[in-house]
Amino acid sequence: MPKVLISDKLSPAAVAIFKDRGIETDVKTDLDKAGIKAIIGQYDGLAIRSNTKVTADLLSAAANLKVIGRAGIGVDNVDVPAATAKGIVVMNTPFGNSITTAEHAIAMMFALAREIPAADASTQAGKWEKSRFMGVELTGKTLGIIGCGNIGGIVAERGIGLKMKVIAFDPYLTPERAVDLGVEKVELDTLLKRADFITLHTPLTDQTRNILNAASLAKTKKGVRIINCARGGLIVEKDLKDALDSGHVAGVALDVFEEEPAKQNILFGHPKLVATPHLGASTTEAQENVALQVAEQMSDFLIAGAVTNAINSPSITAEEAPRLKPFVALAEELGAFAGQLVASSINAVEIRYVGPVGELKTKALTATLLAGLLKPNMSEVNMVNATHVAKDRGIKVSEIKSDSEGIYDTYMHLTVKGECGTRMVAGTVFSDGKPRIIQVQGIDMEAALAPHMIYVMNDDKPGFIGRLGTLLGENKVNIATFQLGRVDAGKEAIALIGVDGDVTPALIEAIRKIPLVKEAKALVF
């Protein structure tokens, strides 16, 4: 009989789902990290919210754990790579609290505009300071949304309903989707310059971390008001305090903080701060929805092997798995490859399945590929919700199946079209069951992807490889693999270099300065 540990509070109805399905269930919500680690080896499943921190150290004791279910969207508290390395499926409930979080952002915006918390405290203290609290109207103001995905889109609709002018910065928001929402798509600097209110609805990634800092805050309109109900770490809190102290930022409403639980914070006590303790998803409806959903998903997995809303595994039945598994790996690599090269919005994705691969469950392959494509900028995307997210962003996805052609019996060819132009990459699975890249931007080459790689596009002229190798050597970067391809002698060429260890931004910038280099990027797989 499968056994599940619930270490954060779930509703009684969610607990009942586990038990009714014949799963032995222990509810232990008062354990610290050491307490969970001491007993985790007994369990097949772990159900959590945001309080339990599932670290690599904790997972080292999880000898029997097969699935982790997060009741909610964010999995910042789960070491997903460590779980993946141990073969543990990590599930979330990506859409159960979207409306609730969006509504909280709107509520925070109202509270900020009319100084409701401070006015409430003053009034209940018997002061009746009517002239002290001079608010601002929302009608006619410009609302700037950073991150216009599922939650951001709901906020945009609510903002338009409040007669606000809504502008949005999101590299993955297509012009068509912007029109559907009724928002104006702008660049970040434009949003900072024009917005009266700025609200953040983007995941915390390397690209979005500290997106509001001293430099970006200086570009905002004097008197701007800022709301963050997304993730701590999107704003440099010290820089925000300086902007509040100077009066450049008129007010800020925060539901999330760099360090949580936020028992102390540099912003606490500031008269222009409205703060709540990460309440974005805290409504009765949302908490019940995600709890029931995670219980159903985990039960289905433990009993029937069904995988739903998995962060690190596609939805594949047990019967399909053996044939599909190597092509799933290929699809993820092709998507991740293209996703790291695309730095702007995506309009269309075309996947060609050539030969026998087209006879497999291509919907799972397409979803896996889309997840790999979108994940570099959207950490919450997974193989199950990727298709929905792409549709939500207005990305046109098409599948084409054809008979075998060329020297390879079967392969997958990905074309991504967006504001940056067109990216193309193709790959196949060799007899060893491992994926290989066979073409990039129409240039034939054969390459296995490594954890750390450097992508370089250059003009094919004598001396380039020598300069590149010398630069890598000077920076103590060891080359593991080096694959080349070119259009023709003296024409455009591409190099894929597998290296041992991380590649720094400084090194990539140095490569870009080598004569003949057109493009250089660090890739991580």
Image (tube, helix red, strand yellow):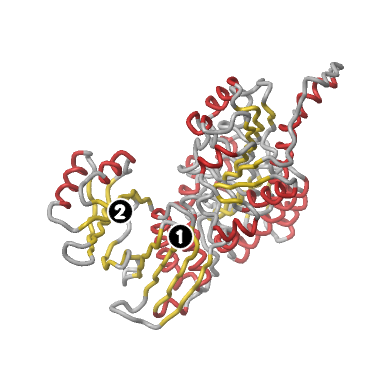
Looking at the image, is 370 positioned above or below residue 43?
below
- Work out whether 376 lies above or below 273: below
Q: Quadrant of the N terminus?
A: bottom right
Give percent across and percent down for residue 63: 50, 49
Residue 336 appears anywhere in the view: yes
Count of picture labels? 2
Percent x, y of residue 435: 35, 65
Residue 443 against residue 13 in the figure, above or below: below
Q: Residue 506's image quarter?
A: top left
What percent of the width, then of the height, locates residue 371? 50, 59
Q: In front here: 292 or 164?
A: 164
Q: Residue at x 59, y 25 (%)?
A: 248
Label 1 sits on a secondary structure element that is strand
Please tell me which residue is depicted at 76% across the width and 44% down the height of the picture.
283
Which three-letter amino acid code belongs to the residue tagged 1? Gly
- Identify the residue under disc 2: 455
Q: Quadrant of residue 122?
A: top right
What percent of the width, then of the height, locates residue 344?
46, 53
The amino acid type of the residue labelled 2 equals Tyr
* Residue hosting label 1: 418
Q: Nearer the viewer, residue 422 or 131?
A: 131
Determine contact: label 1, label 2, CB under 8 Å. Answer: no
The answer to whether residue 480 is left or right of residue 2 is: left
Along the viewing direction, whichever of 244 and 407 lies nearer the viewer? 244
Question: Residue 1, can we see it?
Answer: no
Q: Residues within 10 Å of mark 1 (few under 14, many from 20)?
A: some
Q: Is residue 427 left or right of residue 176?
A: left
Q: Which is more toward the observer, 61 or 274?
A: 274
Q: Mark 1 vs mark 2: give the one in front.
A: 1
Dot 1 or dot 2: first in sequence order is 1
Label drawn at residue 179: none
Label 2: how many Cα within 10 Å (few below 14, some 14–19, many 20+): some
